[in-house]
Image (cartoon, rainbow, N blue to C red):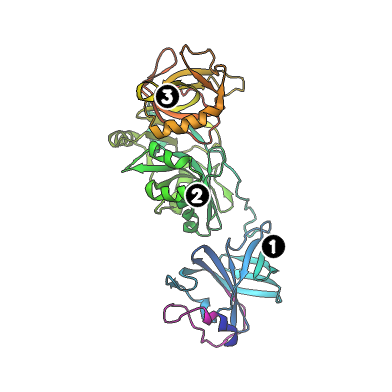
Amino acid sequence: MSKRLDQYRAKRDFEATPEPAGNAAAGEPGGRFVVHEHHARRLHWDLRLEHDGVLLSFAVPRGIPPDPKRNNLAVHTEDHPLEYLDFEGDIPKGEYGAGSMHVWDRGRYDAEKLRDDELIITLHGNRVRGRYALFQTDGDNWMIHRMDPPQDPDREPMPKHVEPMLATLSNKLPRDEDHYAFEVKWDGVRATAYVDGGQARFESRRGGDITSRYPELRALGPALGSTAAVLDGEIVAFEGERPSFERLQRRMHVGNERAIRRLMGEVPVVYVIFDLLWLEGHTTLELPYRDRRKLLDELAPHGQSWQTPGAREGDGSALLDATKRLGLEGVVAKRLDSLYEPGRRSRAWLKVKNQNSQEFVIGGWMPGKGARSSSLGALLIGYYESAEPDARLRYAGRVGTGLTESELRRLVDLLEPLRRNTSPFTPKPRVKDATFVEPKLVAGVRFTEWTSAGVVRAPAYLGLIEDRDPRDVVREDVPNAG
């Protein structure tokens, strides 16, 4: 046994690490196992099997697979001493395997085959039960495969994409406030998080992978550990205590890894989580909002770069008044019995804004005047009459307020390749010296009101909206909540 632990001991300074040196006798016959959750440089799980007086050890980056449809990498590591069956603790920084380690599961196993290149075992643990094969693929790289059906017979695979449910604009809170929960409306970018095997992937509203743009959010995966979940939320940049969409613009369109790393310090973002769409192999879309919210609160994701703000049941007026005092965008009212309807703009969710704002399609620009005479001066914006494929793009006015010099330069670079000779608006607006473009870009605009002519009054540019289909941009009329 002592010789088999030579590699283990050579990698460790036992005066610095709390790990056992390995002095225990073999004791009872083999058959015990332990799975450690190891928060090292990268989160992984360590499967250890008692055999011949030591623990055969495998590092499994994505965890023990719950379903036979997925094989996970298992890296064969050095044998560990038997004392590791009960070891938990923090390995100091600078030591081999530095990070926290705790027991995720333990129990006994039956060995059907134990060869140098293949193991077939049946685990009888508190969390994992079933027959598994581990087989060598290349050197220390092995794979682990579940041979039995899923332990949970009703388990479903994680969805690849869930289109977010949308709220309907309202100028009043619902009369029956006791039937609703009320949340702060966050001024950011809608994003869905897919967390599995300690890794987090973020998608935009239309399904684009935006994980690389916000590296600080990846730590949500290790924070949830082995929990697999799909979360709905908003990526927000704060200016003091208030969300700032203008500030978030600096992060939204950056693709250069070096620039992203620099901006992480200058403009940190937070993922604000407000719904749970799938959890541990089961969809939650058909659960009432109240039940989904309870599950989310039990999961309680909170960290440096993510948070789960509370939802207030009833008394939405108090929350709306508070958002006005704090200069926040408004509130979202969600019926407690409402199901999650992917991709649908539902009246079960109502958004009440303190200021008017919505998305508009950019259809052209006007030249600047004075200091801006050689550049873009104002954007020509519009909206589609409906979501039908043949719907007309209606002109909604021009917006120049809110355009910084850096944003002007970026817009010119994006719009120049989209030039066209004819107006995309129907009817053509009565504007002189306009340069028209293909209606490909979408911008957020704040304004005071709609005029009777169908244009916006006192508009201010908020920023480009990424990954948005222009054909989905329609006028948001403001009905009463009822």
Which picture quadrant has residue 228? Answer: bottom right
Alpha-carbon span between mark 3 and mark 1: 70 Å
Identify residue for label 1. Answer: 148
Report helix, strand or loop for mark 3: loop
Q: Is residue 56 left or right of residue 183?
A: right
Give, as a single range, the part of the protein colored magenta.
Answer: 8-33
Which residue sits at x=55%, y=31%? 469
165 above or below 115?
A: above
Label annotation for residue 86? none
Report helix, strand or loop for mark 2: helix
Q: Is residue 195 left or right of residue 273?
A: right
Alpha-carbon span between mark 1 and mark 2: 42 Å
- Tell which of 225 and 338 is nearer to you: 225
- Tell which of 57 and 349 is nearer to you: 57
Q: How busy is the neighbourhood of tag 2: few (under 14 within 10 Å), some, or many (20 plus)?
A: few
Which picture quadrant has residue 132? Answer: bottom right
Q: Are marks 1 and 2 in contact (CB under 8 Å)?
A: no
- Total numbered labels placed on residues in the image: 3
* First-in-chain label (2 vs 3): 2
* First-in-chain label (1 vs 2): 1
Q: Is residue 180 magenta?
A: no
Label annotation for residue 257? 2
* First-in-chain label (3 vs 1): 1
